Amino acid sequence: MSESESSPRIGQIVRIERGREAGQYAVVIDKLEDGAVMLADGEKRKYDRPKKKNMQHVSCTNFISPEVQSSLLETGRVTNGKLRFAVSKYINELVTDLEKGEQLDGERRCN
């Protein structure tokens, strides 16, 4: 796995795997040199008080929010509303995909 695939990118939705907020989704708003990322979700973790999290304690998703990414790269800031929107949009897409049955979790049904 290359460095770009394994490390989260700015604006990417990640799932927190360890700690008090395990199972929650958040957006990467900054990457630190010591192998950590700064996470915010716009609700519990606002942009002004992000959570520092070790990259080994989060799992990356394939979803990168273009609104959050462009806002952070252009102005250096992002609104909490955009963070909430990005997380809710990802969760809604995830629920829709599960309802469609795209993820079978290894189970196949033959009629």
Image (spheres, rainbow, N blue to C red):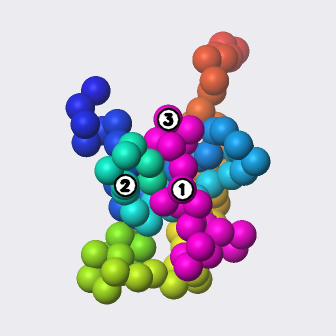
> Residue under circle 1?
52
Find residue 54 and report its horizontal and vertical position in percent: 51, 43
Nearer the observer, disc 1 or disc 3?
A: 1
Residue type marked 2: Leu
Which quadrant of the view contains residue 85? bottom right
Residue 55 visible in the shown view: yes
Identify which residue is drawn at 32% across, 50% down: 33
Q: Residue drawn at (37%, 46%), measured in percent from left and top?
A: 34
In which quarter of the view is residue 70 placed?
Answer: bottom left
Tell me the residue that label 2 is attached to.
32
Q: Earlier in the sequence, mark 2 or mark 1?
A: 2
Position of residue 5 relative to residue 73, above or below, is: above
Quadrant, the C terminus: top right
Q: Position of residue 12 (x, y in %)?
A: 43, 57
Circle 1 residues within 10 Å: few <14, some 14–19, many ≥20: some
Q: Identify the residue shown where x is 27% and y is 82%.
A: 74
Mark 2 against mark 3, which lies toward the viewer?
2
Residue under label 3, please give it.
Answer: 56
Q: Which residues are magenta?
A: 38-62
